[in-house]
Amino acid sequence: MGVERDVAGGGPGGGPGGRVAVVVPCLDEEAAVGAVVDGLRAALPHAVVYVYDNGSTDRTAEVAARHGAVVRFEPRPGKGNVIRRAFADVDADTYVLVDGDDTYDASAAGDLVRLLVAEGLDHVVGTRRADSLTAYRRGHAAGNRALNSVVSRVFGTPVTDMLSGYRVMSRRFVKSFPAISRGFEVETELTVHAVNLRVPQREVPVGFRDRPEGSASKLRTYRDGFAILRWILRLAHLERPLLVHALLGALVAAVSLALGLPVVVEFLRTGLVPKFPTAILASALMMIAVLVAAVGVVLDAVRRASDESSRLVYLQYPAPHELDLRAPGGGAQRAADRAPGRLR
């Protein structure tokens, strides 16, 4: 079999990033996955490439194994499920996440890893720079810009390509990531996790090209766009409950005032309450507004406790720049994981 590679970053002499694992989620990518694996192994010769087959009906797994990847399987559909499984199973110091459709420039992986280590970052996002007019569909580009704007406003941090599938992450970032989502919303969840923990991160433009012939996109513009928007709203409620409940409470209070003020004015002028049902409704709405705001305060306290727990998990692991770049591995991995082309 030749010299076995350690998942960590090093055969003889190691490499930047310590132990580097590349996670490639795939669904029916027979036409593209071979080129992706070859490009990643050339850019990161010290890394182990894990191809996670998410229920492919073609020869994706066979092609990936033939090109030197460690192939694993996740039967539950959805990219979020794949990443949840991979982040739990794979042990490394640095993680590279990239789609298996050969649209991202795999040769940039080495530079992204070196940047993460050199600057002590936890999250590097490869923002897409289209190499052709057809690489980035107009509807997808417009939708991405709109979603970036929503996330930037809600979470208070500028984001330029939150849906990018090309990311490099530190061990402490990955192991503190809850991975709740099931599908393509996982990129949004990764972005919000980075913003919430306020980790050091960078965005770096990378090449983005057309899919190879014979490869079809799994994205459905409207269905997946609405799914991502729903997930943003859910994350906003989970991560910014005080803001969300304050806005809802203010809205209900405004309706209450609109209904109740004329009744109060009439009472002050005549001493009578001619619209008794309206007065009752306005009072009930104001009580509901107060309760909604109070629930927001409670949920915000719970969120803060959850953030503290995530932060404590995050702090258990060393910073990327503390890695010994010349270490021969930093931990043993089973031989089956080290052998390129092993189906598991």
Image (cartoon, rainbow, N blue to C red):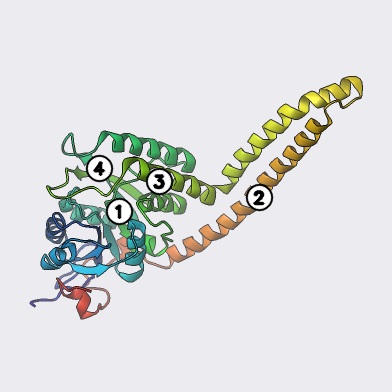
Q: Which residue is mark 4?
A: 128
Tag shown at residue 228: 3
Q: Foreground mark, 2 or 3?
A: 3
Q: Foreground mark, 1 or 3?
A: 3
Look at 13% across and 67% down and name the residue there: 68
Closer to the chain start, of discs 4 and 1, is 1
Q: Secondary structure at mark 4?
A: strand
Q: Which residue is mark 2?
A: 295
Q: Foreground mark, 4 or 3?
A: 3
Q: Nearer the viewer, residue 25 or 30?
A: 30
Real-space Cα separation, disc 1 to disc 2, in angstroms: 41 Å
**Dot 1: few (<14), some (14–19), or many (≥20) neighbours within 10 Å?**
few
Q: Secondary structure at mark 1?
A: loop
Real-space Cα separation, disc 4 to disc 3, in angstroms: 18 Å
Image quadrant where residue 70 sits: bottom left
Closer to the chain start, of discs 1 and 2, is 1
Real-space Cα separation, disc 1 to disc 3, in angstroms: 31 Å
Does 17 appear above or below 298? below
Q: Which residue is mark 1?
A: 119
